[in-house]
Amino acid sequence: MRYSEKTLILMGRPAKNVYIVGPNSLNEINPLGILGSICLASHESCETFVLQGRRLLTYPVRPGKTKGHIVAWKGKKMKTGKSIVLMIVLIGMHSFASGDFLQQTETSLLTARDQFTGGVIDGKIYVFGGNGNPNGRNLKSTEMFDPATDVWTSRVDNNHNDSQGVEELTGAVVDEKLYVFGAWGGVGPSGFYGDINFNEVYDPVANTWTTLAPKPTLVTGAPSTVYNGEVYIFGGGYSHEGLEEQNIYDVVEAYNPATNTWRSVTNMPKKLQMFALATVGNKAYIMGGYLPDEDRMSEEVITFDFETGQWDTDSYEPFPTDRIRGSRYSSAAPVVGGRIFLVGGMEANNADDSWASNKVDIYDTTTNTWHVRTSLPVPLYQHLTVVLEDRIYVIGGCSDYEDTNRSKSEVYSIPIGDIDVQVSIQKCKAKAGKTVGKDSISFTGTMEDITADGLNGAGEIYITIVSDVDGHVPYHIDDDPLIINPAKVKKGKYSHKDKQKGISFKIDTNKAGKFSLKIKNADLTGLGSPLTLEIAIGSYNGAGSAGENTVNGPKKSIPIQLMSGYKDTLPPPLKIKAKNGKKEFTDSLAVKGGFSLKDEPGPITSMTLFLGDQPFDLTDGKGAFTYKRDKKTSKITSVAYKTKKGETPQIKAKFDFVKCSYSVSIKKAGLDTTSGKVDFGVMVDMATGSFNQSVKVDLD
């Protein structure tokens, strides 16, 4: 195995920390200049990483044909001084994300916390209170994050609850001040725990906390939002240590900071807990949550009209079935351009069966549609999400409510990005060419929610194919997109054919974005299934998955030749039969199947076949190998083995490196087993490399 250095070329603003991440690899470079290169720790082969902004894609080549592959991150420029995690796909490594907008790891909180609140004031993030480690201690501390310095700093504590901390908070920003409501905490000198009518405002300029008028209905776990200068608090519950069950309310109340007064608002149409809340225009959107009277999660999206005081429970697209969840505490969900971002949260079957979620979804209020985004690296709920500049910050929270040290200090950020649309793949056909660069693949499916106007102004089309198993990207045209000819966009339809790239693409926005894509004369080395097709048309981005039953249909697998030169594989054989002879040493075994070889084939120095724990040595002097070579290149195309006459067992084997197929015949043998499930394996040492793979087979 050859090893060499890899180089990072950084174009853009300086990054304070850059991480190359794999299962067994973490390298830090600190600092980098505006333009420069630096050698990282050695890995297999040689890779070049080109960093130009927001989006990360890998550009692979077949090993042996060039010195490696290129990875590019394109789009918006990096934010100065940020820590950036490049989730690079290396040979033999697994990726953390592929083909979507890149998530970043930001500077962690000073204190791990969940069930807290916060907001953005004058370009800085403020957080307060919550539950902390160890053993769920309540917090009274305040922190501030300044993106200019990438640093969290402590601010004044809130000692208004007998100098004790509080949790189960909600908060909102009005006129550059943070208003906080709740809470659960200790009451009095006895330390009795319960809900507290805790209503406070933080002034970041004076760095002071001031107590507000008490809320008429004492609740916790109620999200809040702002409309026309008032803070609206929806629902919530009341509990203390002496209550067996929490009292749930459907009440809605509004606080006016200008007068320090409360007023009642139209109640919610039903009791609901742990829902997401956001304000768009003159409406509050309430999404998902837990229905205590029905002991289930709600899939509904309902709205409250601030101007009319009316509720609408029938006009909105519900959660997709597998995305239903709730939020908990904190503040309103982030809203950007009419799109509500739901990041993480809590999924549940009932009150006794719930878990944290890593799902990220967008609800577009302008089109009444849902869009899926790349999942968080960890499941989270009881966290805070806020918009700062062009990113959404995901702060703190927890993944396991039962963990006594559950609170997290980690902070992630995700770019706001463009318009996400749903891509569904109906058919996918992949074919391996006879030589490198002659592979082909085709797709038919739908790219929903893309409009005729959006297609008219799109400009460019980007296409990427990702193997889901290891995140490998065998195909892309991100560096050289298809240029849309506006004159050919007619009545919501567009057809593009590029002979030089070997691509034809058609889409009809009148038929739910029905599309067809054909790619010819391509190098699809490393293509496996399931796979993901990513399409970006202008500002519309979508990704759809094609499983093993979709790629080439349920009866035909993806060509194993596409793994040749990329990975050693030994799939389940197409045929295997073991027979128990009537006499001693008359057993037999016949196997036919496919394989792929990462290294270039070379003369064999040792080779052993295995059936269970029983080895069959093909280099013990009882037989001989014969090789066939390509007449032009002299490269080995196949190898055959045959035992000499009179030797036992009698073995014949052939490995075809072009067709990626093999056959093995063993006769006059004494097999340890001829039935049941066992491992069949092949171990080979060559002058050019090695192969050591096994697969579970059923001899019955």
Image (cartoon, rainbow, N blue to C red):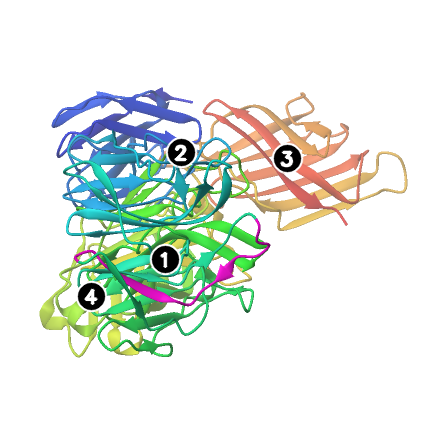
Q: Nearer the viewer, residue 223 or 201?
A: 201
- Cα gap from disc 4 to disc 2, whole angstroms: 34 Å
Residue 250 magenta: yes
- In the image as oriented, which residue stretches furthest toward the front? 189
Q: Nearer the viewer, mark 4 or mark 2?
A: 2
Crowding at label 4, few (<14), some or many (≥20) Cα neighbours within 10 Å?
some
- Cα gap from disc 4 to disc 3, whole angstroms: 47 Å
Determine whether label 4 and label 2 are within 8 Å by CB.
no
Q: Nearer the viewer, residue 70 or 172?
A: 172
Amino acid type, residue under disc 4 in the picture: His
Give the residue pinned by disc 1: 441
Amino acid type, residue under disc 3 in the picture: Gly
Residue 255 magenta: yes
Residue depicted at x 32% and y 29%: 110
- Residue 162: horizontal and vertical position, in percent? 38, 36
Quadrant where the N terminus lies?
top left
Give the residue pinned by disc 2: 91
Q: Is residue 379 visible?
A: yes
Looking at the rendered structure, the secondary structure element under dot 2 is loop
- Cα gap from disc 1 to disc 2, whole angstroms: 23 Å
